[in-house]
Image (cartoon, rainbow, N blue to C red):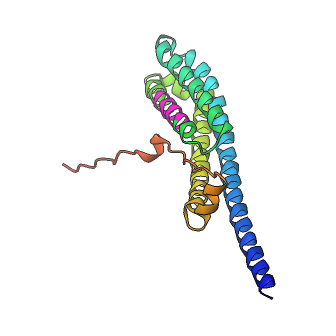
Amino acid sequence: MSLIILMVILIGIGLFVVGLYNGLVNGRNGYKNAFAQIDVQLTRRYDLIPNLVETAKAYMAHERGTLEAVIQARNSAVSGLSAAKANPGDAAAMQQLSGADNALTQTLGRLFALSEAYPDLKANQNMMQLSEELTSTENKVAFARQAFNDAVMGYNNRREMFPGSMVANMFAFLPAEPLKIESETKRDVPKVSFS
């Protein structure tokens, strides 16, 4: 009789551990799937940039340094995305992607600031359409990043909370790193003055 009770307890513990393990696998697959959405949107963003630069090139011939900086930043961001795609959630890959994407956002900001000085460029149909598509894509990136970060938080909570932490350590489930994009997190508060 006591042997049967011991077997039932061991089977119960085994099922409990299997459930925890499967929950961790589910969480890891969830954040990897969420990263796939970021990949789609960032790839679209990066694919739009050469067209934007080509459109601006005709109007901004003497702003070659800015145009080259945008292309160089785009290429770095594509490399960062490739590294992150290979291992979503890896801290080094997420930091590389974040840094490269922040640099791209800054150089694009300079391009758009310079384009203000070129009324013909601002009025160009291609430039307006590309700017609108880029803005729309950046909004989609923000939503995809939020979904990814939520999935990473859920996974990390599962792997850090007891008893999941024991199973996570036993089977080497590593923590995942959320994607932080500076341009979305650091926004200056507008200053209002009535004087």
Which residue is more in the foreground, 90 or 135? Answer: 90
Q: Is residue 192 visible?
A: yes
Q: Position of residue 165 (x, y in %)?
A: 58, 61
Q: Position of residue 61 (x, y in %)?
A: 51, 11
* Left or right of residue 163, residue 192 in this image: left
Q: Is residue 52 above or below residue 2?
A: above
* Left or right of residue 14, residue 71 in this image: left
Considering every residue shown, the one lying at the far front of the view is 2
* Majority secondary structure in the magenta region: helix
Considering every residue shown, the one lying at the far bottom of the view is 1
Residue at figure coordinates x 52%, y 28% from the top left? 122
Residue at figure coordinates x 44%, y 27% from the top left? 110
Residue 9 quadrant: bottom right
Number of callouts: 0
Q: Position of residue 84 (x, y in %)?
A: 62, 37
Q: Is residue 134 above or below residue 28?
A: above
Which residue is more in the foreground, 113 or 118? Answer: 113
Query: Which quadrant is the N terminus positioned in?
Result: bottom right
Inspect the magenta stretch and tell me whether residue 98 lies in it.
Answer: yes
Q: Which residues are magenta?
A: 96-107
Residue 85 quadrant: top right
Residue at figure coordinates x 66%, y 40% from the top left? 39
Q: Is residue 125 visible?
A: no
Inspect the magenta stretch and tell me whether residue 147 lies in it.
Answer: no
Considering every residue shown, the one lying at the far top of the view is 62
Residue at figure coordinates x 54%, y 28% from the top left? 123
Q: Position of residue 151 (x, y in %)?
A: 62, 56
